[in-house]
Amino acid sequence: MFHLILYEPQIPPNTGNVIRLCANTGSTLHLVHPLGFSLEDAQLRRAGLDYRDMANVRQHMNLAACLGALAGARVYPVETSGTRLYTDGAFRPGDAFLFGRETVGLPPEVLSRFPPARVLRLPMLPGNRSINLSNAAAVVVFEAWRQNRFTRPTPPGSSASRRPS
């Protein structure tokens, strides 16, 4: 359905929560190394519970490898400095949402790879730094899914898409 890219995530419970999010929305999670933890971390397992086997999680050695694997996908960085509200996009299945490190967001050299009009932001009260990574990912992926009428991903070999029950 959609792709969530976590660029060098550092906090295991956030990634565990995003794994759970992806399992429940049919999205694919892309983890860009280096990670600030081991995928065997107890906090990651606890947050992701038993959803890890239900989620499609891919690992990439760097952002270039990730973007290469997503060739053709429209990639939307999500950053506090974004010029466009996340609700202003017209999202379609296959789109990818790129989130930065929990502590510093996306570095300028990463953001410079994308047109400024593609960089999304979530509105917040002035003076606050950011919304929790897994919460921001959930807000964005559910907006994209809502725009697509909550259509379920089509299984390989099937031509029918279904609305969730």
Image (spheres, rainbow, N blue to C red):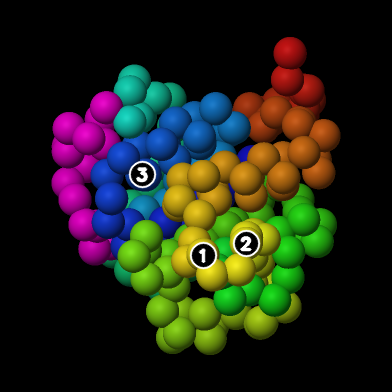
Other-residue count near label 1 (Cα within 10 Å), few / some / many at <14 / 14–19 / ≥20: few
| Tag in front: 3 or 1 | 1
Numbered badge on residue 163 = none
Residue 104 falls in which quadrant of the image? Answer: bottom left
Are the residues tagged 3 and 2 within 8 Å (C-beta)? no
Residue type, mark 3 in image: Thr
Are the residues tagged 2 and 1 within 8 Å (C-beta)? yes
Q: Quadrant of the N terminus?
A: top right
Q: Which residues are magenta?
A: 32-46
> Percent position (x, y) of residue 105?
42, 69
How far apart marks 3 and 1 lie (CA) works out to 22 Å
Residue type, mark 2 in image: Leu
Comes first in the chain, label 3 or label 2: 3
Numbered badge on residue 15 = 3
Q: Residue furthest top?
A: 165
- Asked whether the viewer can see residue 85, the reply is yes
Comes first in the chain, label 3 or label 1: 3
Q: Which residue is mark 2?
A: 125
| Tag in front: 3 or 2 | 2
